[in-house]
Image: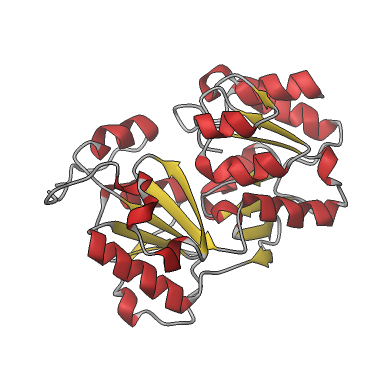
């Protein structure tokens, strides 16, 4: 959604809205697949008139698939509690911030700017916790590792221009390495090899259960609709879209997509600032 269906103001443009509704009217099944929580896409589902029977969404980068009307979880793969603790310990070792996504909140161990923005964008509260004391029954579906620096303030303002937060001090870090999240070899193999790890933003890594990604969510929803793989179109821009774009019968990268996404895509549409979703829909439908 972000960087794909939504423009720079986190809005669905008139052209995108018109094209998506045209597709729905033609009988095309439209499913939002996002790294956001389900709560974070509800206003957009309402705008698209998708909160009705037999309509579904994919949230937390494929860890959750839900019924838009009943909010029933149709597919959910959580991160194991013991793995969550290992990931948190790694964050402490590397002085990274961490946010963990449940269905109803975002858990953090210390305040950080990105999680503040993300909580507002997802319409869920931030909950400060001691992960080492966290109830093992808490269901966490996605973890973000955040490499926060003084540069992140401007990036966040650019990414979320409609969200205005109070200024906050960004912690200084000894020997700060802004490229740390691109150097996965630095992190424990036990964590990197046993989870799905994607990079949706330059300063952020997403960690999911090894069994899930957006392609897994797409497969689960396609089963409900009895739609074969070759009839699926996926459009995306970010690192967490790679799996589903590669899986789809037709994978389309946004004009503003990461180069890796463009490399594996079957086609490239216009950017999210140029109504790229509408352009793709009108081209293929």
Quadrant for the N terminus, please.
Answer: top right
Residue found 54% across the figure and 45% down from its top:
240
Indicate left or right for 125 with 210 as reference.
Answer: left
Indicate left or right for 50 with 163 as reference.
Answer: right
- How many numbered callouts? 0
Viewer-nearest residue: 24 or 186: 186
Residue 210 position (above or below residue 257): below
Residue found 48% across the figure and 68% down from its top:
140
Viewer-nearest residue: 73 or 191: 191
Residue 106 position (above or below residue 222): below
Indicate left or right for 70 with 11 as reference.
Answer: right
Residue found 49% across the figure and 64% down from its top:
104
Quadrant for the C terminus, please.
Answer: top right
Place residue 124 in its image quadrant.
bottom left
Indicate the position of residue 44 as horizontal and vertical percent values: 59, 40
Indicate the position of residue 123 as horizontal and vertical percent values: 45, 52
Indicate the position of residue 155 as horizontal and vertical percent values: 31, 33
Indicate left or right for 137 with 24 as reference.
Answer: left
Residue found 51% across the figure and 69% down from its top:
79
Residue 174 visible in the displayed image: yes
Residue 38 visible in the displayed image: no
């Amino acid at each position: 959604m972000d960087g794909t269906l939504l423009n720079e103001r986190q809005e669905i443009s008139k052209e995108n809205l018109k094209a998506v509704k045209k597709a729905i009217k033609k009988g095309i099944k439209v499913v939002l697949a996002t790294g956001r929580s389900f709560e974070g896409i509800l206003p957009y589902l309402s705008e698209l008139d998708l909160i009705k029977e037999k309509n579904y969404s994919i949230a937390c980068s494929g860890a959750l698939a839900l019924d838009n009307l009943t909010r029933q979880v149709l597919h959910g793969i959580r991160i194991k509690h013991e793995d969550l603790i290992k990931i948190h310990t790694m964050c402490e070792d590397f002085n990274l911030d961490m946010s963990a996504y449940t269905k109803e909140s975002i858990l953090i161990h210390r305040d950080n700017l990105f999680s503040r923005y993300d909580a507002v964008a997802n319409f869920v509260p931030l909950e400060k916790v001691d992960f080492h004391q966290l109830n093992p029954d808490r269901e966490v579906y996605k973890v973000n590792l955040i490499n926060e620096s003084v540069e992140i303030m401007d990036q966040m303002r650019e990414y979320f221009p409609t969200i205005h937060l109070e200024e906050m001090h960004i912690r200084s870090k000894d020997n700060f390495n802004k490229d740390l999240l691109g150097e996965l070899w630095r992190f424990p193999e036990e964590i990197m090899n046993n989870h799905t790890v994607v990079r949706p933003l330059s300063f952020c890594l997403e960690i999911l259960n090894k069994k899930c990604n957006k392609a897994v969510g797409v497969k689960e929803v396609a089963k409900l609709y009895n739609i074969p793989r070759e009839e699926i179109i996926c459009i995306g821009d970010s690192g967490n879209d790679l799996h589903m774009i590669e899986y789809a019968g037709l994978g389309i990268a946004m004009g503003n997509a990461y180069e890796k996404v463009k490399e594996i895509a079957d086609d490239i549409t216009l950017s999210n600032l140029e109504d790229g979703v509408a352009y793709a829909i009108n081209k293929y439908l």
